Amino acid sequence: MSKSPEVSRKMYDVVIIGTGLYGIQAARYYLDIHPDKRLLLLESDDVVGGTWSSILFLHVLLDQVNRSTPWKDQKERIYEDFWTQTPVRMAEFSDQPMTPPAEQYYGFFPGKYTTAYLESYVDNHVYSGQTIRDRVLFNSNVDCIIEIPQPDSAKGVHWEITYNTTQNIRTSKVIDATGMTSQPQIPTLPGASDFKGKTLHHKSFGQSQALLLKDPSIQSICIIGGAKSAADVAYACAKSLVERKIHWIIREDGNGPSAFFAAPAMTERYANSNEGFYNRFLASFLPNRFGNRWGWLKWLLQRTVLGRWYAKRLWDGFDKGLRAFHEYHREDGKETGFANLEYDTP
């Protein structure tokens, strides 16, 4: 690991909070334009990557990153069955192609390869003799940010950042790249205080999976939630060698789960379903800011009775095709209860 940057009371030009995907890219973009500026990244963990942070434990990954020094113990956030939901050609930054992972399924791959990619990325980008990693202050948890009043003659705004309770730095610019997954969102459940079993958030699953899945005393596991993280954990628990009951609870109204599509593309034009959905035409069916070039089509599809009818027919067709592809009621799945995985709502 590189040494932490020397921190003083001297002003920084920009401070970025977080070293996940967006924090790393914010640093790269800013330094591409201003390579001599004083830039600092604050990271609460002891490793870069955010959601994709982990120990690099396979020689193939160490070779890919070309590191000569051993890794210290780090906090796992990925795990064996944590796969990307973005294929290779859409998971890389434009200025550094990703080496095609050895393990792929229609372009999708295990998260550990993203970890390796990000680790190499912060080491390969050098500005004024410093890599992006050299500019990261690890184990630095931000407590607060306050605006510092400036004289009328001074230009711009200054900010004071307090981290680790007692440490302070000042900067003229702040970029918040903490993301949506830095702090676990745990629901308040009636009777939770009376539950005597083990409880954990998905963020901690990577650190606990080895003991959790191999412990024969744990006879029942309940997963609450319907998005990708819940699906990954449910799959990891179901395929574990220890025989136990797995309960996957999703709210009755069906809200919450992400859209799940089969990996193969519906046409040969695309390598997988993900690439097939990211095109200008289908952007018109989604409530987003993209696809304004086809604004008239978006207006037709979302603001007229005929358009909404057609859009519903399209999504119903995708839904029907997805159910047929998975064959929830096939013969070899009756004994294992595979049909129970079929979702209740469109």
Image (cartoon, rainbow, N blue to C red):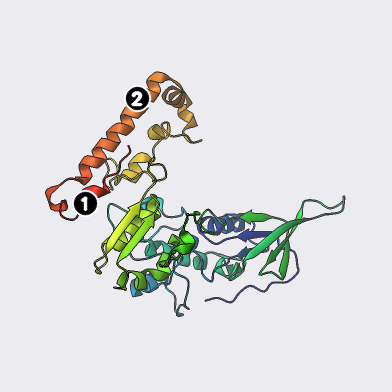
Report if residue 37 is visible in the image. Answer: no
**Residue at point 24%, 67% (across, down):** 243
Identify the secondary structure beneath mark 1.
helix
Q: Is residue 324 above or below residue 17?
A: above
Disc nearer the start of the sequence (2/1): 2
**Residue at point 48%, 29% (across, down):** 293
**Residue at point 47%, 77% (across, down):** 73
Rendering coords of residue 318 (x, y %): 29, 36
Rendering coords of residue 13 (x, y %): 70, 59
Q: Which residue is mark 2?
A: 310
User: Residue pushed farthest left?
Assistant: 331
Report if residue 66 is visible in the image. Answer: yes
* Circle 2 or circle 1, nearest the eye: 1
Tell me the kind of residue under disc 1. Answer: Phe
Q: Quadrant of residue 81?
A: bottom left
The quadrant of the image that shows the C terminus is: top left
Q: Which residue is mark 1?
A: 338
**Residue at point 46%, 52% (across, down):** 94
Q: Nearer the viewer, residue 22 or 255?
A: 255
Tell me the kind of residue under disc 2. Answer: Tyr
Dot 1, how many residues are within 10 Å of its Cα: few (below 14), some (14-19), or many (20+)? Answer: some
Identify the secondary structure beneath mark 2.
helix
Q: Going by the image, does 54 lie left or right of 4? A: left
Rendering coords of residue 18 (x, y %): 57, 61
Q: Nearer the viewer, residue 222 or 191?
A: 191
Q: Going by the image, does 37 lie left or right of 260? A: right
